[in-house]
Image (tube, grey):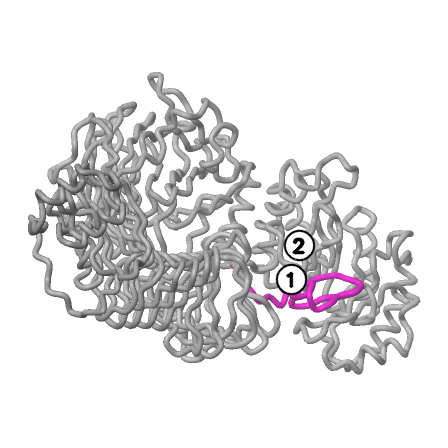
């Protein structure tokens, strides 16, 4: 599959509750934004005790301490800007210390000198001290930043007077600084952003110099709002102003005031960014992309929350730290690289970190802590350390290679079709610890030895090239436990919700993007449906799919839904993707999508669809408003293509309903699962202008119409697990398989020696027919055998039938035979051994004449040959188990001395 870099068009993500000139101004700054940057020389942090961990948590490019001391930054690579806080600090010793510090570029001036509770300096006193400072630093190459005033009328008057006098005196002032706390409520973050940016521009225009904003935040000075309300307002505010500050060439630096409880950029131990601080810190969020090729990130962390970090180019970058915070984030690229020695990767509990791209990523030293999901989809992830944490591991493609001292422990290790775990070069086997599961899908592979500890489960199909050692208390289960899986799945028909805003009545599972009120559950003809869209701006809604409706990256599936437009000029899209940017409307989240648009004639609308980088020509026209239409999206994940079918009513679709002549390409191309339903819209005449209903997922190409009668189509799939090596099953361990019929059953293949002990449990799969006399199930294919099963648990049979297990270890077969009267030892023959059993009281009616008569009448008879299969000759004499037959209900037998 392709794995294109997903540089998203964020234009459609604007979320501004303003109109007119304000909307235009905010759109201009917002839409001009660049992708989030991990490194920024403008990004600052203010802390009297600035230390390594909090500087790293903020991604600071520079910092200050409200003083001349650098605090305790350790080896964190942020530049320090000393501050002469007040006039009292201006003396020759301090000036010399700053002057002789080769690492200092910017020097900050007095702190809020207009305020009596801060530096408390008149303009005249400040000019006097500034003269000493300016002269003292002359010729040093240090740059002087003006005193930082509060952005009040008093502060503005003070700095205006100061700059006029400094210019008249020829004093050095290389930049202008100010503090902003201009809004104290959460009511209009976009308006606050516009006001703030206008102040940034004002200070620049004051002297036509660069600007530093050394403190700023929205803060509730009166205690009227909760911290959560103000923090969310700050998040929206920062989402707008940080791209604008980065894009303004005259902004030299900015430093958020982190120390209010409603303005925290980071939290926790070790500290990590809060969602409020994501934009400020440069966290790569959904739609963000950064190529680290050729760059040295020093001690900075690549924080990920749904974004993509790539490594391309001739030279790999030096990146030491990666922290996946939430959502599904991607590391990709074509250039091989490794986490630098002493570095780390951390995956937080709500995060998935997915390796894509053709390159090799190595974690050969340092640490890898997985408390979420570590996923490999393409290329190779080399692990040479012990993976810590309690998160799952998924290998859906590519290779996870354990090298050196690499060890992998996870509650679930899931190797899907096309994925490989390579443990062939490490000294220790791949160990599955108690309570943990190794799930191996057909088409998945493990290279190297595997050991299952007590309480562990190794399950599925696929191939293990190496030895498997099943310890006491462990289970090897071929297949899925006999559970039939639905091939058709209802995603949502909206009948379980009350009418109202999605955010109030249907969240979760649905999410109204930007917490919009323009996504509703409404009634249409007595049936609940979803509607969405706003007449003034972009709006959207999405839902993360349940596992049964997720289309894996190598699968083919069909998404069915119904659409109904209230307007003849809709601007609405419906489709599927691998993520949702819920903080905005990001059409780049789509992979397969249909668009409802204005029709050719009044009272009608039209359909087109996305085909790679653009939309198709109109696919359907003249569609009536307020009328329901059926859509089938037939999606081929392996090829990154899809087809669109259109119909109405309750009839199935046919080839004639297909709208596109050739397959349509995904919008981006993805190596991820399609796991999200998206409804995204631009402005159109009517609020909530499009309705959607009856969302289904079908496995494969399926053009049936669920409205004509829904059949989940449950099926059970037999699986084969191949162990290309030896298999050791200890006493107290368990082997499990399932049967459907003689042609459909699970199978274990061992190419080497199978050393057997413990138990065998065979059960019938869901909806399996009752086995009949003559049925043969070839469930084991063993190269050679030693030992025997301690116990057998087999399905119940009809009266008069028995399981013949005499060839189980020789040829791997279970056979159903008719039970012979007088066969008291259950070996399939009536002979002298049965007379001995009668004499010892081992017949059904111990010592009875009727049992003796049964033996006499049937002496010398043998079971009939199987009716459906021929049992091959044994390939080994190491049977151990001998000949045993199981009657009626499932029974358990221990090994018997002969």
Q: Are marks 2 and 1 in contact (CB under 8 Å)?
A: yes
Instruction: Decide: is 27 above or below 253.
Output: above
Work out whether 90 lies above or below 438. below
| Snapshot quadrant of residue 348 | bottom right
Nearest to the observer: residue 22 or residue 64: 64
Helix, strand or loop under label 1: helix
Q: Residue lying at the far top in this picture: please name it.
A: 526
Does the magenta portion include 53? yes
Q: Circle 1 is placed at which residue position?
A: 57
User: Mark 2 highlights which residue?
Assistant: 265
Rendered residue at 62%/43% (across/down): 232
**Whole-percent x and y of residue 152?**
79, 47
Q: Residue at x 63, y 58 (%)?
A: 272
Residue 788 seen by the camera: yes
Residue 557 image point, x, y percent? 25, 46
- Under circle 2, the secondary element is loop
Tell me where the magenta segment starts and ends, as one range: 36-65
Query: Disc 2 versus disc 1: distance between alpha carbons?
Result: 8 Å
Residue 611 position in % (x across, y down): 26, 50
User: Percent from the top left, x then y, of residue 581?
Assistant: 46, 47
């Amino acid at each position: 599959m392709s794995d294109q870099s997903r540089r998203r068009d964020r234009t459609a993500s604007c979320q501004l509750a303003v109109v007119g000139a304000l909307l235009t101004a905010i759109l201009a700054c917002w839409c001009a934004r660049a992708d989030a940057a991990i490194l920024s020389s403008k990004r600052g942090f203010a802390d009297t005790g600035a230390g390594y961990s909090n500087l790293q948590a903020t991604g600071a490019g520079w910092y200050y301490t409200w003083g001349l001391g650098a605090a305790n930054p350790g080896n964190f690579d942020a530049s320090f800007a000393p501050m002469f806080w007040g006039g009292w600090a201006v003396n020759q010793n301090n000036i010399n210390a700053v002057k002789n510090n080769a690492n200092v570029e910017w020097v900050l001036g007095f702190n809020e000198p207009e305020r009596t509770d801060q530096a408390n300096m008149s303009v005249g006193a400040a000019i006097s001290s500034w003269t000493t400072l300016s002269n003292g630093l002359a010729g040093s190459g240090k740059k002087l930043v003006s005193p930082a005033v509060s952005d009040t009328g008093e502060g503005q008057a003070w700095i205006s007077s100061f700059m006029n006098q400094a210019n008249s005196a020829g004093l050095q002032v290389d930049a202008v600084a100010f503090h902003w706390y201009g809004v104290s409520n959460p009511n209009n973050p976009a308006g606050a952003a516009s006001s703030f940016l206008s102040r940034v521009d004002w200070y620049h225009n004051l002297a036509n110099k660069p600007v530093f904003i050394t403190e700023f935040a929205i803060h509730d000075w009166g205690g009227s709002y909760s911290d959560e309300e103000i923090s969310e307002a700050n998040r929206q505010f920062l989402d707008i102003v940080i791209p604008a500050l980065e894009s303004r060439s005259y902004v030299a630096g900015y430093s958020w005031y982190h120390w209010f409880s409603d303005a925290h950029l980071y939290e926790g131990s070790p500290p990590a960014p809060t969602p409020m601080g994501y934009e400020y810190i440069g966290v790569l969020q959904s739609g963000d992309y950064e190529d680290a090729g050729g760059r040295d990130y020093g001690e900075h962390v690549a924080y990920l929350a749904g974004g993509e970090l790539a490594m391309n180019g001739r030279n790999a970058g030096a990146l030491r730290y990666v922290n996946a915070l939430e959502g599904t984030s991607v590391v990709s690229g074509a250039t091989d690289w490794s986490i630098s020695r002493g570095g780390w990767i951390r995956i937080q509990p709500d995060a998935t970190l997915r390796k894509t791209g053709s390159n090799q990523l190595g974690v050969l030293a340092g640490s890898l802590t997985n408390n979420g999901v570590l996923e490999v989809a393409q290329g190779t992830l080399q692990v040479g350390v012990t993976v810590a944490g309690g998160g799952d591991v998924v290998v859906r493609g590519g290779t996870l290679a354990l090298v050196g001292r690499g060890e992998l422990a996870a509650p679930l290790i899931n190797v899907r079709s096309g994925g490989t775990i390579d443990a062939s070069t490490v000294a220790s086997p791949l160990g599955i610890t108690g309570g943990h599961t190794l799930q191996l899908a057909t088409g998945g592979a493990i290279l190297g030895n595997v050991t299952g500890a007590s309480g562990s489960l190794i399950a599925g199909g696929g191939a293990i090239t190496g030895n498997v050692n099943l310890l006491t208390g462990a289970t090897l289960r071929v297949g899925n436990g006999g559970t039939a899986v639905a091939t058709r799945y209802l995603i949502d028909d909206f009948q379980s919700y009350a009418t109202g805003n999605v955010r109030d009545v249907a969240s979760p599972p649905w999410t109204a993007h930007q917490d919009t009120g323009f996504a509703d559950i409404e009634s249409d003809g007595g049936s609940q449906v979803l509607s969405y869209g706003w007449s003034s701006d972009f709006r959207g809604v999405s839902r993360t799919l349940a596992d049964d409706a997720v289309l894996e990256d190598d699968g083919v599936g069909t998404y069915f839904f119904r659409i109904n437009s209230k307007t003849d000029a809709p601007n609405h899209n419906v489709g599927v993707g691998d993520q949702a940017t819920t903080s905005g409307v990001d059409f780049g989240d789509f992979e397969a999508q249909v668009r409802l648009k204005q029709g050719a004639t009044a009272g009608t609308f039209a359909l087109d669809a996305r085909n790679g980088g653009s939309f198709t020509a109109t696919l359907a026209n003249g569609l009536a408003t307020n009328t329901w239409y059926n859509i089938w999206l037939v999606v081929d994940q392996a090829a990154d293509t899809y087809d669109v079918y259109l119909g109405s009513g309750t009839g199935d679709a046919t080839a004639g309903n297909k709208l596109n002549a050739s397959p349509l390409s995904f919008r981006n191309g993805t190596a991820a699962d399609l796991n999200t339903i998206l409804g995204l819209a631009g402005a159109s005449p009517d609020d909530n202008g499009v309705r959607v209903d009856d969302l289904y997922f079908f496995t494969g190409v399926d053009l049936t119409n669920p409205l004509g009668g829904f059949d989940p189509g449950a099926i059970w799939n037999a699986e084969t697990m191949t162990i290309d090596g030896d298999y050791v099953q200890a006493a107290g361990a368990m082997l499990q398989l399932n049967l459907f019929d003689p042609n459909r059953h699970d199978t274990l293949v061992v190419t080497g020696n199978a050393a057997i002990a413990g138990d065998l449990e065979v059960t019938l799969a869901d909806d399996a027919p009752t086995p009949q006399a003559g049925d043969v199930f070839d469930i084991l294919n063993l190269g050679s055998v030693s030992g025997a099963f301690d116990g057998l648990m087999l399905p119940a049979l009809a009266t008069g039938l028995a399981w013949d297990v005499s060839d189980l270890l020789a040829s791997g077969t279970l056979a159903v035979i008719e039970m012979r009267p007088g066969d008291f030892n259950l070996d399939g023959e009536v002979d002298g051994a049965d007379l001995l059993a009668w004499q010892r009281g081992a017949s059904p009616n111990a010592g009875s004449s009727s049992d003796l008569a049964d033996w006499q009448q049937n002496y010398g008879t043998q079971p009939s040959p199987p009716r459906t299969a021929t049992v091959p000759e044994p390939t080994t004499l190491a049977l151990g188990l001998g000949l045993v037959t199981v009657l009626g209900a499932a029974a358990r037998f221990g090994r018997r001395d002969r």
